[in-house]
Image: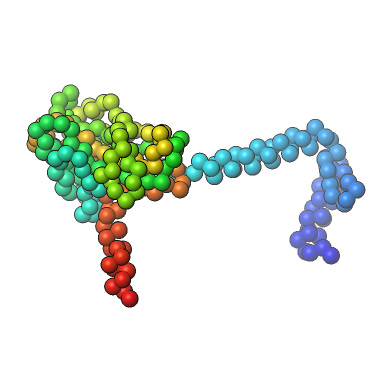
Amino acid sequence: MRTGLQSQFFRKLFLAEKKFPAYYTHCGSGGYEFKNRKEGIKVKSLLVLTLLFAFAQFAVADITETYGWEGTATILGNYGDIIATIDVDPVHGGDQSLKLVDDAESGTPQAYVGWVVGLSDGDVVTASFWRYDTTPTAAPSCRIWGSWCDDPNDITAYAGSAGGQNDYGPGTGWDLAEYTWTVEGGHTGLVIQVRTYSEAGDTVWVDDMTITAPDGAEIRTPDYAEALSSDTWAAIKATF
Ligand SMILES: [Ca+2]
Ligand SMILES: [Ca+2]
């Protein structure tokens, strides 16, 4: 027995057949096929291509997180001496930005501003933030950089440099610092850093960060620790 929808479908097909007799013909089983074989192959190929395209879109779907330092959280961690605070001037977006003061006499201190976990070889991660300094071709300056971290529970589990940006920016106010990493060597996590240059007291500002990673990975921004601490085992136990 045909349902109302089926009847509708067959009625439409019958009308189409009347209108375009060259395209349709009955086959034995009561279905319909293209009378013109070439046309049929063309339409079927299009259908297959459409499905492949839809699948490819699904397979490379990305997730994106942004952070603009509008709350109280500054950084996820650091390496070397660096002082991170929330500031209100200069600001790129909103009302606040991140102020970073290099507090190391030597070396390059790093502020961890992003953390992507659940990665595997071939995954692509892109991160950007706006940086501010007004000293062209001289310190203070900063760059976007990455390091591998294979322990999703410990941001200090350094597993080697992932490389980063070559240029220190124009140093004429705000400019967008951006870098793209491709995961290799079996690494599962990437820490995104702001590296400051180069002497104690050198100050830069950072704002409006965007991190994009493949679907299935997890992107952590500076408010991650706050979100986590409100959901600790202690808090869960306290409810029982
Ligand atoms: Ca902001
Ligand atoms: Ca500079």
- Residue 220 in the image: x percent, y percent? 33, 49
Q: Nearer the viewer, residue 68 or 154?
A: 154
- Residue 61 in the image: x percent, y percent? 49, 44
Q: Residue furthest right?
A: 28
Q: Quadrant of the C terminus?
A: bottom left
Which residue shows up at 21% across the image and 54% down it? 72
Quarter of the rendered structure image containing ligand 2: top left
Q: Nearer the viewer, residue 225 or 88?
A: 225
Camera sees residue 176: no
| Position of 30 relative to 202 (above/below) | below
Q: How is the image coloured?
A: rainbow
Total numbered labels: 0
Quarter assignment of residue 177: top left
Quarter assignment of residue 231: bottom left
Quarter assignment of residue 160: top left
Which residue shows up at 39% across the image and 49% down it? 218
Q: Nearer the viewer, residue 15 or 237?
A: 237
- With 117 as the anchor, is 12 left or right in this view? right
Camera sees residue 104: yes
Which residue shows up at 79% across the image and 37% down it? 40
- With 196 as the anchor, is 114 left or right in this view? right
- Residue 207 in the image: x percent, y percent? 25, 43
| Position of 95 relative to 149 (above/below) | below
Q: Quadrant of the N terminus?
A: bottom right
- With 111 as the anchor, is 152 left or right in this view? right
Q: Residue furthest bottom?
A: 240
- Residue 196 in the image: x percent, y percent? 18, 34
